[in-house]
Image (cartoon, rainbow, N blue to C red):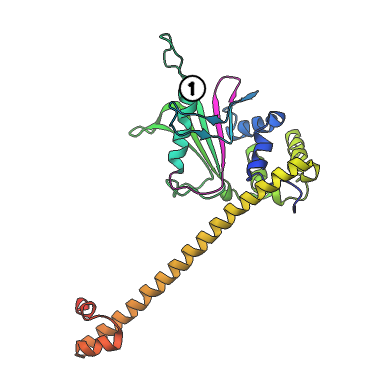
């Protein structure tokens, strides 16, 4: 294995840092940093990350991290490496599970719900609906369209575009800055940055150091890295293919435009259409349409 510290974008790396009871202080610190003081999470309880539907044949959901804080508020935290066409739909669907599980059987329940937060840490630029947004942190709530006021504040979706975070070590100010720097750069670091001196980062770098893994942990991490690399390679291959197809399409369109200009010039000189067909390679119908 190359590198000193684990890649938090891998399934093993992310769950080791944020999904284990042993390291829950890392998750607590990250959540408090993300909410800029609006949350004061003192403790979290990890919940079953595999959620089943209401029926036997219903689609299930498996979360990377699912927990609740000491006030009973629910948090789904997902690391997403690949853009999906219906990713927003997926996050909305995921949020229905912690909502429905709060329903109480019997006639005394008054439909009171505790807040639900669905957090997507995205290893790509999520342009869908955020094209004009300049920041990398996006918080979405139900809003009254006319007044732009929050209509319901107990359902929150947070999307964090990791690639857009571009602060250098010397520019890190808040704890959120520091956590984002870790999420983006951890696997490329060879030592703990001077800017990350808080006690919580002491624990993080201890847990992230690959040389301290036992054989089983190392095997699990290697498998996770290979799966992550397969995803990255698949994305790059698709992007290259799309780029090549775009170039080919562009060349074809450019060649046709050139032929049409030549045909138009010949038409203006009174050259017979039969001759223009031979000279340009366009059909008689295409040439007629130019007229």
The residue that appears at 54% across and 61% down in the rendered structure is: 237
Q: In which quarter of the image is residue 45?
A: top right
Q: Can see residue 170?
A: no
Secondary-structure class at tag 1: loop
Q: Residue at horizontal 47%, vertical 37%?
A: 91
Residue 127 in the image, given as x and y percentages of width and height: 46, 49
Asked if residue 246 shows in the view, the reply is: yes
- Judged left or right of residue 119, residue 279 is left
Looking at the rendering, the stretch of residues picked out in magenta corresponds to 68-86
Q: Would you say 60 lies left or right of 21 here?
A: left
Residue at 30% in and 85% down: 280
Most extreme residue toward the top, as rendered? Answer: 108
Residue 74 on the magenta span:
yes
Residue 26: which quarter of the image? top right
Q: What crowding class fits label 1: few (fewer than 14 Cα within 10 Å), some (14-19), or many (20 or more)?
A: few
Query: Quarter-wise, where is residue 75 in the image?
Result: top right
Residue at the (65%, 35%) spot, across then down: 18
Q: Residue 72: give x, y in percent of width and height.
A: 56, 20
Residue tagged 1: 101
């Amino acid at each position: 294995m190359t590198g000193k510290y684990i890649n938090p974008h891998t399934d093993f790396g992310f769950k080791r840092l944020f999904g284990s009871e042993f390291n829950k202080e890392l998750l607590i610190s990250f959540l408090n940093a993300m909410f800029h003081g609006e949350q004061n999470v003192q403790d979290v309880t990890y919940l079953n990350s595999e959620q089943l539907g209401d029926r036997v044949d219903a689609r299930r959901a498996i979360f990377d991290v699912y927990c609740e804080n000491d006030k009973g508020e629910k948090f789904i935290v997902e690391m997403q490496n690949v853009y999906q066409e219906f990713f927003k739909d997926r996050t909305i669907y995921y949020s229905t599970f912690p909502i429905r599980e709060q329903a109480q059987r019997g006639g005394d329940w008054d439909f009171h719900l505790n807040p639900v937060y669905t957090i997507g840490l995205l290893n790509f630029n999520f342009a869908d609906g955020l094209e004009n947004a300049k920041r990398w942190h996006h918080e979405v709530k139900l809003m009254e369209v006319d007044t732009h006021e929050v209509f319901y504040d107990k359902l929150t979706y947070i999307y964090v575009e990791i690639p857009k975070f571009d602060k250098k070590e010397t520019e890190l100010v808040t704890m959120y800055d520091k956590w984002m720097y870790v999420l983006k750069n951890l696997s490329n670091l060879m030592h703990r940055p001077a800017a990350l001196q808080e006690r919580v980062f002491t624990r993080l770098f201890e847990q992230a150091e690959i040389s301290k893994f036992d054989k089983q942990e190392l095997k699990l991490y290697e498998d996770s890295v290979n799966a992550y690399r397969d995803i990255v390679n698949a994305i790059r291959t698709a992007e290259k293919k799309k780029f090549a197809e775009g170039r080919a399409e562009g060349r074809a369109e450019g060649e046709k435009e050139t032929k049409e200009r030549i045909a138009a010039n010949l038409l203006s000189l009174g050259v017979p259409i039969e001759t223009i067909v031979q000279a340009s390679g366009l059909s008689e119908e295409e040439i007629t349409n130019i007229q």
